[in-house]
Image (cartoon, coloured by chain):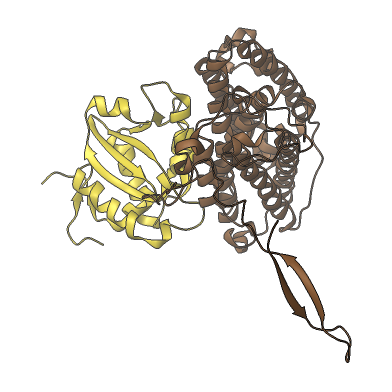
Chain colours: A brown, B yellow
Amino acid sequence: MAKQTTDTVSATKIGETPKQVVHPEPQYRWMNQSREWGTRVLPGEKGLTLDSLNVGIYGEIPQRWDDQGRNPRGAIPVKGALPIGYSVTSKTELWAPSAAQLYEEAIQRRWAPATDVPWSTVQPLPDDVETAICQVCTEISQYANTDIEVITSWQHRMSYGYHEVKQFLATASLDAARRYEALRKRALINGGGLGLEPMGQVNRVLLESRGGWTETVSALALIRGLFLVTMCEYLLRHAYNEAERVIYSYVIQDVSRLVNYGLDHLQYSIAHDDERLNAITTMVAIGVAMHNRDLRDPVLREALAIVFGGGVAGARKEGMSIFFDFMDDFRKRHLELRRWLKLPADPASLPLGYRPRDAK
Amino acid sequence: MASTSLLFPSVEWLQAVREVFNTSEQYRGTGSGRCDCLVGLKVDNELFRVDFEGFGCESVKEASQADLDEADFYIEMPSDEWKAMLDNIRTNGHAVGEYTINTLDLGREEGIAHSTHGDQYRQDLFVRYNQTMQFFFDASSRVATTYERA
């Protein structure tokens, strides 16, 4: 039987006799329970990074993580807890060797649109250019909304055994929120405003992909992410002020991390699961078909042509020519990534509107 | 700024840029950060390797073709285009307009960033660390540069 101690506590009312309260002597039985005591990770040249903590049992990343709780990897699990219902429990379904590094990088390369963008450099522009920029901002903001929803809708299904991935994806959804914020601010700072909501067939593919996270990632990285990075590289080249240059250059970095996670994960998954290649191939084909439909909508194409061409007058020739250069670059990169992942990459198999100009 | 002009391309010139890059607060700010990658530079037939680690540039060396094969990516331009970019940086304090590495990359059929290993993940570090690369070359604005061998 546990020892007991007696304390005298103050009366609640003036004049009452102090009450005697009995409570058990602390036993501290929870102490000295650790799966590997004595671990001591020291900061390296890059600080105390997340991946540097993967030592001993704490670095054992299992092929499956069936624990249905929120058990931090390496802790002693509670018994008899109600299962939470994680469905992404296999390493091949989400792992990317670079996830911890990407997480650290996202933290270090953070930026705040409110203060890090030189907003005062935005000066009045001709109405046609401002309208086009605002339309592009609207489209990118909607992509960002989709990214947030897609990432978070999968994140809570992922086992805690793979915390590196969950943590990186937390930064990726914050990146998307910041992207939304920055582009919305650009749309509203210069006498314009938001434009038309885009069609978003790719959004539907991403949001309604229920087959698996890997399949979702294949469209998120190879189609949406790569398209956005390439578009921002062209927008950076044709920016009208320093504020836009800062926004686009930071967005490129942010989205590149997500694309890189996607590539790393797809490569890992294909290498460790024979069934994955076919599923990814199918998902990419669906994504490409839907993206091809999105591209038939003239709104983004025309808005970009105006931005690249310096106005409606320049959009018809120079602007549209630059738009096609952008699309060619995107499609070529898309095919290069496919080849690298050993996915089918014959340009002739793509929808006509999706083929690089030199492959038509 | 160094009082004696240093020859571009050379290890000495890259060392001077590295020193400015590693010691200037302006290149440590927002949008920059940890960068771990091995970058090759190709100026006509002259090769160099620039090793980025953590928050700085760890080393610069002359390189062989084998070093270039090891690099995550290498940036290749003819010497006159390097000169045009560096002149633009020197005039403006940082790259402007057509002379940012992003725009230079877009402006060429095959881009300016390449790799021999074909690993897309590694080659994409050029995009992921684009701001850091730009900061590195922008640091050359404070290095007196000559293109003529004495």
Residue B137 appears left or right of A52: left
At x 51% / y 32%, what residue is drawn?
Answer: A60
Residue situated in front as seen by the camera: A146 or A267: A267
At x 38% / y 31%, what residue is drawn?
Answer: B73
Query: Quadrant location of residue A141?
Result: top right
Query: Quadrant location of residue B61?
Result: top left
Asked whether the viewer can see residue A309, the reply is no
Residue furthest out toward the front:
A1
At x 63% / y 32%, what residue is drawn?
Answer: A225
At x 47% / y 39%, what residue is drawn?
Answer: A54
Q: How many marks?
A: 0
- Up/down of A9 relative to A82, above or below: below
- Up/down of A332 relative to A228, above or below: above
* Residue B105, horizontal then vertical, whole percent: 45, 34
Residue A325 appears left or right of A159: left
* Residue A282, horizontal then vertical, whole percent: 69, 13
Query: Quadrant location of residue A274?
Result: top right
* Residue A70, horizontal then vertical, whole percent: 69, 41
